[in-house]
Amino acid sequence: MKAKNLKLIARVEEDLKVVSAYLQDSIASVSDIANLKKNKIFLMQLNRFMWEDVEKGVFRKNKRIRTILKFENVLEVNSKNINQSKKDKFLDFLAIESNQMPDNNYEMRIIFAGDSIIKIISEVIEVTLDDQGEAWDTKNKPNHKAL
């Protein structure tokens, strides 16, 4: 049976936490990040580790799938510790954090390993995660050290 590709839509902060959880341990290339200012859209393609498959059974293979993360109604995008001229650099996704600002806009921070951050200011939370194509096997399963 072919697995269905995941498609999530976030419109409130709780939804965004779900999207963040599914993206944990994804990998993004700097070249696969785009801010379309005129369209008020921020896009990022990631290779998402399919944790939902791993947790279904012990004997399943580790898989990744390409996914598109899209933010709409974007007013401003800033980054920290990301050299945009190094297009071949990879970023390890950790989480998305959000908060509503005093002007009622939302600040959403995409946090990567190595203290790299993309900060998005948006009028509303309108974020989609949309898997693309077929998943592939990967030898490496992300490993987290216990604190």
Image: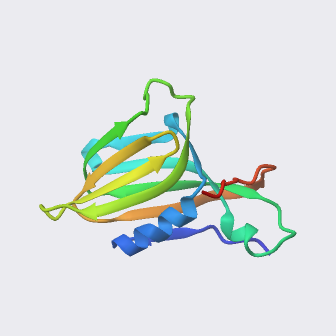
Find residue 134 and report its horizontal and vertical position in percent: 71, 58
Find residue 71 and report its horizontal and vertical position in percent: 37, 56
Please report the residue visible at 12 percent of the width from the left and 61 percent of the height from the top: 103
> Looking at the picture, does residue 82 appear above or below residue 63?
above
> Looking at the picture, does residue 141 appear above or below residue 128?
above
Q: Is residue 11 visible?
A: no
Q: Is residue 24 visible?
A: yes
Quarter that holds the C terminus: bottom right
Q: Nearer the viewer, residue 70 or 50?
A: 50
Colour mapping: rainbow
In the image, is 21 to the left or to the right of 122? right
Q: Nearer the viewer, residue 43 or 107?
A: 107
Find residue 72 and report its horizontal and vertical position in percent: 32, 57
Please report the residue visible at 34 percent of the width from the left and 73 percent of the height from the top: 12
Find residue 120 and report its horizontal and vertical position in percent: 31, 50
Please report the residue visible at 74 percent of the width from the left and 58 percent of the height from the top: 63
Q: Residue lying furthest top in this view? A: 85
In the image, is 136 to the left or to the right of 31? right
Q: Nearer the viewer, residue 90 or 6?
A: 90
Quarter that holds the N terminus: bottom right
> Looking at the picture, does residue 26 appear above or below residue 117?
below
Q: Residue lying furthest front in this view? A: 147
